[in-house]
Amino acid sequence: MTTQSSKTNVEKLMNIDPRIIYTTVFIIIGITVLFPLAVPAPPTEHTIAVYEWINTNVRAGDNILIDYSISPSNYVEMGYGSAAFAVQCFQKGAHVIFTALIADSPPLLLNKWPVDIQPLLDKYNLKPVYGVDYAILGYVAGNEVGVASMATDMWKAFGSKDYYGTAFSKLTIMASIHTQYDLKFVLAGGGSTANVEYFIRQMPVPPKSSFATGSTTSDLYPYYPGQLLGVLGPGLTRSAEYETLVGYAGGGHIWMFASTLIYGELFILLILGNVLFWYGLMKKRYSSRRISGMKV
């Protein structure tokens, strides 16, 4: 019989107290909260393609549509990137309108997003004026039908009023925006693959791209480069990359540090758990063969 003192280090590791693992996870998460760091995020092909297209083709006065179909569950993946994208548009002097196919997106845009975009606006001394440089049109119902409605008549799709109830006729920015032909570029919300496909099918005229969650990124690759200039996903990585391109290490970089550290630990535990499982299984089989081979 094997006593506690005679157990090997591997056997001790196989019987480690679960509380030690939980404590380790808690410490790692605590580090990311108490000591947030901005890790490097070198831009890759798709991110560079979108950024360079905006830099090369967008002029002052051009209209950009950002479909802000982002929910609290995927804000970290796409919110910071969309902020960096909007700032690039403002730097070019473009006009930006915000729409949403998800009902809980406008409140997120009004309350959380300004906190994250303000440091970027301050850094470049940008002061976009509501109704002139940007406008929040809000939620449009109907999903694909809603996108089709926006493509043919933007005013009618929103009842000629913005999210605050202000008439479009009082918003300078809306004087030149009526159909998809008035849009220079569309950044489609990528919280769902379907959201992006709605814009691909119903708003084919303006070039477009989309931030995408890790789970929807692969579904969008078939649309590149024919219908999408770039697939900005997995969202958190591409958000950090877009921040790099606009010269700011913000929330995307910080969350990259957190996710790298946490997933790194989980990856190590996963590999270690599998190795120990197979070690125990093989040892058990070896012991059984020894016992069966002994002579009585």
Image: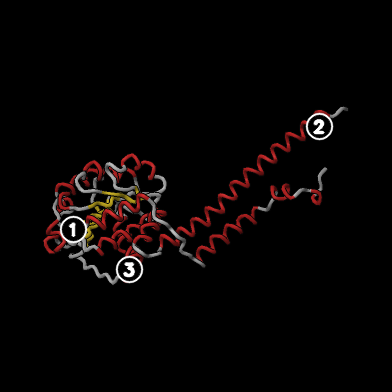
Q: Is residue 260 left or right of residue 142?
A: right
* Secondary structure beneath label 1: loop
How packed is label 3: few (under 14 Cα within 10 Å), some, or many (20 or more)? some
Residue 189 image offset from top left, x and y in percent? 30, 50
The residue lying at 18 percent from left, 58 percent from top is 62
Q: Nearer the viewer, residue 150 or 59?
A: 59
Q: Amino acid at mark 1?
A: Asp
Q: Secondary structure at mark 2?
A: helix
Task: Report which residue position mark 2 lands on.
Answer: 291
Q: Which residue is mark 1?
A: 62
- Estimate the x, y position of residue 67 in percent, counting from the top left: 27, 53
Name the N-terminal-most of marks 2 and 1.
1
- The span from disc 2 to disc 1 (Cα, nearest Å) is 80 Å
At 57% across and 57% down in the image, what residue appears? Answer: 25
Above or below 87: residue 48: above
Q: Residue beneath label 3, please? A: 118
Rounded to the nearest angstrom, the CA distance separating label 3 from label 2 is 71 Å
The reply to whether callout 3 and callout 1 are in contact (CB within 8 Å) is no
Nearer the camera: disc 3 or disc 2? 3
Q: Amino acid at mark 3?
A: Gln
Inspect the image, locate mark 2, and give the three-letter code of the amino acid beneath it: Ile
The N terminus sits in image quarter:
top right
Q: How many marks?
A: 3
Label 2 crowd bin: few (<14), some (14–19), many (20+), radius 10 Å: few
For marks 3 and 2 on the same chain, the one whose residue lies earlier in the sequence: 3
Image quadrant of residue 246?
bottom left
